[in-house]
Image (cartoon, grey):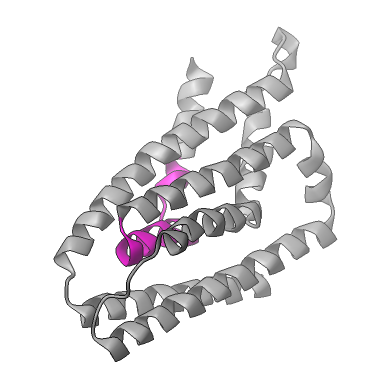
Amino acid sequence: MSDLVAFIGLSLSVIMIPGSNTLLVVQNTLERGARSGILTVIGGNLGILLQGLIVAFGLSLEAARSPIVVNTLKSAGGIFLIFLGVRFIWTAVQLLRTRRTLEVSEEASNRTFYEAFVAYVLTADTAIFFLTVTPQFIHTSVGDSPFLKTILFTLLYITLRFVWMGVVVAFSAQMRRWLRDVRVRSVIQIIAGAICIYLGIRLLLR
């Protein structure tokens, strides 16, 4: 029970710290509505589940030891963040030019799911978190199965993240109702885009 409480505490400390992925949830909710926000959360969680499965099978252990694999993931993740940042800014510019909210098609809304999935798959931080944290709670001396326990912790992490991000989506959706002014929303999108580009460049240079 103490291991479970400790893991929940560590997970929440990671989940609740705002980062590029939280920014993606907020931005997609503000730009496209609560449905897109939820799809972003689901896509991100599936990306985390994939990483958890990789860790459980022990594949990421070898990947983490290879600088080439880690650097490739960082580069791909950085480029993708820059791409998202540019898209955010471009959308804001279009809003300012038309002075009206752009129509959000179902296809565009669904695209947030794939964007979030790719963003999380290309983010090595979550896999590294599982690699460094889960071994501390696996006790083979008392019969723990590394595979099953890693899957269990991954599912628990996803559940905690879904609940917290659900709160973020609800808050962002409420903000969307308040932010009717196109100029205000455009400024927020430009700031979000600039932050994404900055994080992407930092990831490339790290």
Question: Is 21 inside the magenta-drawn segment?
Answer: yes
Which residue is most to the top?
142
Residue at x-position 37% and y-position 64% = 27
Residue at x-position 60% and y-position 38% = 49
Residue 193 visible in image: yes
Quadrant for the C terminus in the image: bottom right
Residue 132 visible in image: no
Between 33 and 89, the residue placed more toward the observer is 33
79 to 141, vertically: above or below: below
Q: Quadrant of residue 151?
A: top right
Q: In which quarter of the image is residue 105?
A: bottom left
79 to 48, vertically: above or below: below
Q: What stretch is highlighted in magenta?
A: 12-33
Q: Main secondary structure of the magenta part?
A: helix
121 to 75, vertically: above or below: above
Horizontal side, residue 83 vs residue 12: left or right: right
Percent of width and height locating residue 126: 60, 47
Residue at x-position 53% and y-position 55% = 116
Question: Is 4 inside the magenta-drawn segment?
Answer: no
- Marker count (numbered): 0
Horizontal side, residue 185 vs residue 18: left or right: left
3 to 15, vertically: above or below: above
